[in-house]
Amino acid sequence: MAKLKAALLFLAVAATAHADWTIAAATTEGSRVGVQRRHVVLEDAETSESATVDLALFSTKSCTLRVIDQPTPPPNDLAHVMAQENCLAGVNGGYFDPDYAPIGLLI
């Protein structure tokens, strides 16, 4: 129930931010490993713009959140790194530099 509340809070914030966003479509996929994938398409009625949000909802009791850094070239794609590290979900943060160079920011 807490995961659902967090997702709804996120969507409520997204829906009220600087535009009149509405949920055009939403799907949820469950998993045997305790991670739930939620795919949401938002649309702005005024500008006809759309945004896609993909969420991975998980319990900290069954999953661990960690940062995986790739400081040396060549960079591997996200799918390769996720398989190598046995990850269930991932976010690629290397888009800040067009050459995938480290920018010195590690959050």
Image (cartoon, rainbow, N blue to C red):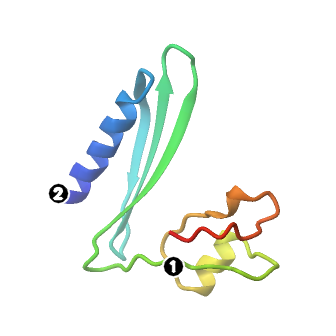
Q: Give the distance between the C-alpha atoms of the residues marked 1 and 2, in whole angstroms.
A: 24 Å
The kind of residue tagged 2 is Met
The residue depicted at 69 percent of the width and 57 percent of the height is 95
Question: Percent position (x, y) of residue 80?
Answer: 68, 77
How dense is the environment of label 1, judged by Cα within 10 Å: few (below 14), some, or many (20 and up)? some
> Which residue is painted at 36% across and 77% down in the image?
33
- Which residue in the protein does label 1 denote? 87
Q: Is residue 70 left or right of residue 75?
A: left
**Above or below — where is 6 with respect to 81?**
above
Q: Quadrant of the N terminus?
A: bottom left
Q: Which of 8 and 14 is in front in this view?
A: 14
In the rendered structure, the answer to whether residue 83 lies left or right of residue 29 reads: right
Mark carried by residue 69: none
Quick one: SS at disc 2?
loop
Residue on which the image places disc 2 = 1
Q: Where is residue 31 in the image (x, y as percent from the top left)?
A: 38, 69
Which kind of residue does numbered mark 1 sit on? Cys
Secondary structure of the residue carrying tag 1 is loop
Residue 92 x/y as whole percent: 61, 64
Q: Which residue is drawn at 76% across and 75% down?
A: 75
Q: Reading the chain from its start, which is encountered first: label 1 or label 2? A: 2
Q: Which residue is drawn at 29% across and 80% down?
A: 62
Which residue occupies the extreme left position in the image? 1
Using the image as rendered, state which of residue 20 and residue 70 is in the foreground: 70
Q: Is residue 12 left or right of residue 101?
A: left
